[in-house]
Amino acid sequence: MIEVTAIPALRDNYIWLLAHGPQAVVVDPGEAEPVRRHLMHGHYHLDAILLTHHHTDHTGGVAELLASHAGPPPVVYGPPGVLPDLPVRTVGEADRIRLWPALELTVLAVPGHTLDHLAYRGSGLLFPGDTLFSAGCGRLFEGTMEQLFAAVERLGCLPASTRTYPAHEYTLANLAFAAGLEPDNALIAQYADRATNAQMRQQPTLPTSIQLEHDVNPFLRTREPTVRTAAERHAGRTLGDPLEIFSVLRQWKDTSTCTLTLHRGPP
């Protein structure tokens, strides 16, 4: 049985801790101290660190975790060049990481947000980093719109039941944007209520699922007539294929100011 725990970090990050008995793995430790507290509290041994991409809010705690760890150091997995001054076991598309007998993860290359971006999936779990958020997706920093669209579509093709653990608490802001596109989508409204209640209790809105994202995430709903109509109204022109709709939505979201109640910070 794999237990997954959200460790809040920085302004709005989540570091995901996977535990199997006394063994633990963390995904994208942007800072070390919250991880160290959880390891001590749970009496865990840190076996591995998984990195999705090179941004500091996902890697900033790695050096301290390695330096402060007693016993055999955890193995750090990540894309080429992610932390050039630290020992990293480079992984890429279709590589498999055998963490424990109970957990093997497959690496997916999903460039777009960054060129080096990876996701990790296995045992019905997905760690998409900043490629896929709940009701949203990552901004473009290095890749092309075509790459980001392909990456989001690829993750959207995973089994509907896949439990998905994005790296940021952006759900409410993303749902505000989604509700503006599809004001009559009852599933968006229901999810917004649940997410608001979770945040009022100081609980994460995550994980999500691939099925839920197909229901509420406009970046996975570019083939829906309601999303097309909203995107065309915003663009002031007729749009073509889903990639063009996705591009309009991503550029629109980059400048959007619509919000619900935010807990820890904007996307």
Image (cartoon, rainbow, N blue to C red):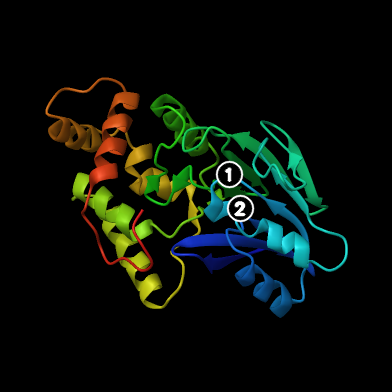
**Residue with the most extreme right position:** 71
Q: Residue at x 21, y 44 (%)?
A: 181
Please tell me the numbered disc located at residue 54: 1
Left or right of 217 on screen, residue 115: right
Q: Which residue is drawn at 33% across and 37% down?
A: 221
Give the percent coordinates (x, y) of residue 258.
21, 54
Dot 1 crowding, Cα within 10 Å, few <14, some 14–19, many 20+: many
Question: In the picture, residue 265 is in which quadrant?
Answer: bottom left
Q: Do the residues labelled 2 and 1 touch (CB within 8 Å)?
A: yes
Please tell me the numbered disc located at residue 226: none
Q: What residue is shown with label 2?
A: 59
Which residue type carries mark 2?
A: Thr
> Is 148 drawn above or below residue 25 in the view shown?
above
Instruction: Let me know if residue 182 appears in the view.
Output: no
Which residue type carries mark 1?
A: His
> Is 50 drawn above or below residue 92 in the view shown?
below
Circle 2: element type: helix
Q: Which residue is drawn at 15% across and 35% down?
A: 234
Circle 1: element type: loop
Q: Which of 207/92 is in front? A: 92
Give the percent coordinates (x, y) of residue 195.
37, 65
Give the percent coordinates (x, y) of residue 47.
79, 59
> Is 138 drawn above or below residue 3 in the view shown?
above
- Please identify the quadrant where the N terminus is shown: bottom right
